[in-house]
Image (cartoon, grey):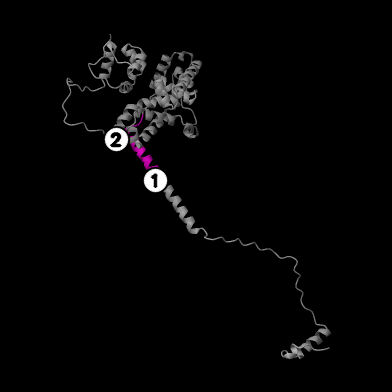
């Protein structure tokens, strides 16, 4: 009966996977180094099986090279009074960036096929992480949080409208890598993301389903169809082990480098300040326009004045001509009569 290795304490299963990824090793590469099956390494990292026997000792020594010894027999252990000082937010962010960014840029390149877009997506993801650092720092998997944001940014359909991304980038120099990348980019984005996470990054199927926001059966269906499509375009990729190795080699051949952590933090802070000032300016503009409208708007209804129109059918004014004889006699009679008095009111008999 095999006995569990307890000579040196092992880190938790998730920490084992992170230590392996920090050395840019896949499960298949670590399995070949230890002389075990890939499923065994997957079981060790998931916690379903404890390392035991000679293979377990080799695995424990591999992890012990990256975990500082804290036992009483440690040769370099020195008593330190009190607890160690906690990391500042900037130091914790820089540590996460140094741990994840180099590999994440290469993985993102497999998704979008563009070197500059991959670097930009990763930097944008870390800028968002720095803006929401209290939330990200308390997350169960900060690296997974940043990876999900970077993948979403790289697969955004709005990049096609940017002038700098309207034309394709130069393909890889190796013809085999060109065929692999071309076949990968012809997959639907959801299939491509699932394939990269499972066969490229090495996540389990439940983890892949959770990161792609799908159920486990849906993620398995996407993975199956993606592998079939890749095998139809490149027949030699029907072997999943070969597909995993080819994806790792393709991402490793590209010289992709991320910016330094302080630069990313500074750009994130500047972007945050810019959008804050823009929001304040927009709010002030809206308030000013509303105030001006209230001051200049009418307080009561004023009916509109009808437009002027020319009056039709009025006879033209005719100048008076000379008076006739009867008219002259009538005028003389009127002038000779009294202009006031009772006789003006009483009728005159005829």
In the image, which residues are magenta? 258-280
Say whether residue 295 is visible: yes
Helix, strand or loop at mark 1: helix
Give the image quarter of residue 256. Answer: top left
As for residue 51 lying within the magenta part, the answer is: no
In the image, residue 297 sits, relative to residue 331, either above or below, namely above
15 horizontally vs 293: left or right = left
Query: In the picture, which quadrant includes the C terminus?
Result: bottom right
Q: Which residue is identified by label 2?
A: 89
| Magenta region, main secondary structure | helix
Helix, strand or loop at mark 2: helix
What x and y, as percent, mark residue 8?
23, 18
What x and y, as percent, mark residue 293?
49, 55
In the image, residue 272 sits, relative to residue 110, either above or below, namely below
- Please identify the residue farthest to the top as the structure is shown: 1
Task: Characterize the local packing of mark 2: few (<14), some (14-19) or many (20 or more) Cα atoms within 10 angstroms.
Answer: few
291 horizontally vs 335: left or right = left
In the image, residue 163 sits, relative to residue 329, either above or below, namely above
Q: Which residue is identified by label 1?
A: 277
Task: Characterize the local packing of mark 1: few (<14), some (14-19) or many (20 or more) Cα atoms within 10 angstroms.
Answer: few
**Distance from Cα at disc 1 to Cα at disc 2:** 24 Å
As for residue 271 lying within the magenta part, the answer is: yes
> Disc 1 vs disc 2: which is toward the camera?
2
Of the pair 7 and 348, the residue shown nearer to us: 348
Ranked by sequence position, the earlier of labels 1 and 2 is 2
Of the pair 251 and 87, the residue shown nearer to us: 87
Query: In the picture, which quadrant includes the N terminus?
Result: top left
What x and y, as percent, mark residue 95?
30, 30
In the image, residue 112 sits, relative to residue 280, either above or below, namely above
């Amino acid at each position: 009966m095999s006995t569990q290795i307890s000579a040196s304490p092992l880190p938790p299963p998730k920490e084992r996977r992170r230590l392996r990824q920090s050395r840019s090793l896949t499960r298949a590469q670590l399995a070949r180094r230890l002389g075990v099956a890939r499923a065994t390494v997957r079981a060790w990292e998931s916690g379903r099986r404890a390392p035991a026997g000679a293979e377990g000792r080799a695995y424990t020594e591999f992890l012990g090279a990256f975990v500082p010894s804290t036992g009483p027999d440690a040769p370099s252990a020195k008593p330190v009074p009190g607890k160690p000082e906690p990391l500042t937010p900037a130091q914790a962010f820089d540590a996460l960036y140094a741990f994840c960014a180099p590999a994440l840029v290469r993985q993102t390149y497999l998704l979008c096929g563009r070197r500059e877009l991959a670097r930009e997506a990763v930097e944008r993801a870390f800028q968002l992480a720095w803006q929401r650092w209290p939330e990200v720092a308390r997350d169960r998997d900060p690296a997974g949080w940043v990876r999900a944001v970077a993948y979403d940014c790289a697969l955004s359909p709005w990049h096609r409208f940017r002038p700098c991304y309207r034309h394709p980038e130069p393909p890889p120099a190796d013809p085999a890598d060109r065929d692999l990348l071309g076949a990968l980019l012809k997959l639907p984005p959801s299939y491509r993301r699932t394939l990269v996470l499972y066969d490229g990054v090495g996540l389990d199927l439940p983890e892949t389903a959770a990161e792609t926001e799908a159920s486990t059966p849906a993620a398995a269906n996407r993975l199956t169809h993606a592998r079939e499509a890749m095998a139809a375009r490149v027949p030699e990729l029907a072997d999943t082990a070969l597909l995993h190795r080819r994806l790792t080699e393709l991402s490793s051949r590209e010289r992709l480098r991320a910016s330094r952590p302080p630069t990313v933090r500074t750009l994130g802070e500047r972007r945050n300040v810019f959008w804050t000032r823009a929001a304040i300016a927009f709010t002030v503009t809206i308030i000013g326009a509303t105030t001006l409208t209230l001051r200049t708007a009418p307080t009561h209804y004023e009916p509109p004045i009808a437009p002027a129109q020319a009056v039709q059918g009025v006879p033209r004014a005719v100048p008076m001509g000379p008076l006739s004889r009867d008219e002259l006699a009538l005028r003389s009679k009127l002038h000779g009569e009294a202009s006031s008095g009772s006789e003006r009111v009483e009728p005159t008999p005829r």
